[in-house]
Image (spheres, grey):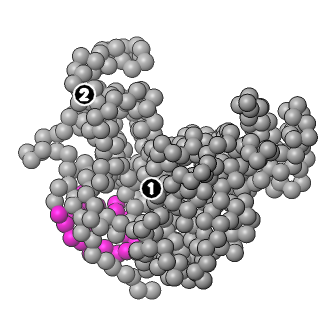
Amino acid sequence: MATQLLMAKDPAEAIGSKTASAAFIAGGTEVNRLGSDIAAKADTLISLKKCSGLADIRKEDGCLTIGSMCTFQQLIESDDVPAYLKEAAHFMASRTKRNMATIGGNIAAARSDSYLIPALHAAGAVLNICCKEGECASVAIADYLDEQDKYTDALIVSVSVPTDIVLVSKRYANTAQSHAVLTASAALRDGGLHMAGAVKNVGILHFCDLEKAFMDDPDISEDAIVKMVRECTGLHTSDDMFGSDDYKRYLIGVTVYDLHRQLRGKEV
Amino acid sequence: MSKQYKVVHCTINGKEVEQIVDVRASLTDMLRNDFRLTSVKKGCEVGECGACTVIIDGEGFNSCIYLAVWAEGKEIWTLEGLTGPGGELSDIQQAFIDEGAIQCGFCTPGFIMTSWEIVNSGKEYSDDELRKLLSGHLCRCTGYENIFRAVKKTMLRHLGKFEEAEKVNSQGIADYPEPMPFM
């Protein structure tokens, strides 16, 4: 259990202090929760709260760079943040919590009911990451999530997102405050369709087979999509308190179908 | 395993204070245990119920997931700070009483702190916006309508719209029928 806390003054100090038994703490909504695994496993927490230069939002040719310590509420209140990301930030219903939760923290926590990751994944967001060796790199969020073990000692400094794309999202939960069983997003960018989702207790999923099915036949039926998801062997859903395996597969199917229809309606 | 302590300097309810805290302590723990500000309730401790809400530098936060050491240099307000020097209730507290927005009272301090921020913002929010602004709080007793009405009436009064505030009272929010009198 964490008993030590380091208040890093800047990203370099935070990265320099990171050891295998230390964990970064950003807004605190994940690490400070009662029963948090992160706080239980770490012996030292490195607070990024007072780190300088991590909460800026900058516009650069069709792309927006958002500091990792920007809170959900800052995203909502900023005039520069695209509507799709504001919508995803609104998925966290509590404003008091939105005042704390950060974009970087939400990505690093990579929860299976993540609020922002499906939208960022579909948008093709790029993470600007600094490692202990002093190297900085830009990594696509999809690659970061695929190889997260590689980045355990790295710090997400900022997130770059496109502003000129069409992206739609849906979230299903019992109440606005409850954890979502499914959050899914679909985007049209770079001449293609991109779909991603967060399925509770399963993880973050890139729906590449479904993207291909929609690209091959834009008029594919809802039944055919649901059948594809039901028969998908690579999807490891199971029965739990959030719903049965069959329910989750059905929900994914009808949701991505709806998202695709919405996107087609928004195509110019 | 040794614990680490730090000194925190902040302003609580208008008074500058200094306190030594365990670095892992939450602001809820500091306010309740060290300053006896027991209006700050320990509810879910995961930032979902809003019972621990306090105002930090003008914005509402869940103090249960906010480290006490992060309060260094901050201005914090709890429910105890809203009352006048003689213990007079603030208008938002009185509105909660007048509208019957309190039953068991556990969620009330958190609701009032968020409401205080809303009514002092100088903005007129729509009904939808008000509901969204209050959505970080859970109440298992009142069904929310009375709370909503107390906040809306106080917001309108702060904006000088006294007549409109009274209409909220007589017309109700959503045309609910008058309750039957007790027999």
| Amino acid identity at mark 1 | Met
Numbered disc 2: secondary structure: loop
- Above or below for B33 versus B91: below
For label 1, the crowd category at 10 Å Cα-Cα, with few meaning under 14, some 14 to 19 and many 20 or more, is many
Where is residue A103 shown, x and y percent of the image?
Answer: 54, 56
Where is residue A188 shown, x and y percent of the image?
Answer: 74, 42
- Tell me where the magenta segment starts and ends, as one range: B16-37
Chain for numbered disc 2? B
Residue at 44% in and 73% down:
A10
Q: Nearer the viewer, residue B157 or A146?
A: A146
Tell me the tag on residue A156: none
Asked whether residue A73 is in view, the answer is yes
- Above or below for A49 versus A84: below
The answer to whether the residue labelled 2 contacts the one labelled 1, judged by CB atoms less than 8 Å apart, is: no
For residue A136, side relative to residue B107 (left or right): right
Q: Quadrant location of residue A107?
A: bottom right
Residue at 20% in and 45% down:
B82
Q: Quadrant location of residue B23?
A: bottom left
Q: Which residue is mark 2?
A: B159
Residue at 39% in and 82% down:
B3
Q: For the C terminus of chain B, which image quadrant?
A: top left
Q: Nearer the viewer, residue B120 or B87?
A: B120
Numbered disc 1: secondary structure: loop
Which residue sits furthest left? B86
Examine the structure image and report whether residue B21 is included in the region drawn in magenta: yes
Where is residue A190 shown, x and y percent of the image?
Answer: 76, 47
Examine the structure image and report whether residue A224 is included in the region drawn in magenta: no
Residue at 35% in and 32% down:
B147
For residue A262, side relative to residue A137 (left or right): right
| Amino acid identity at mark 2 | Leu
Tell me the tag on residue A100: 1
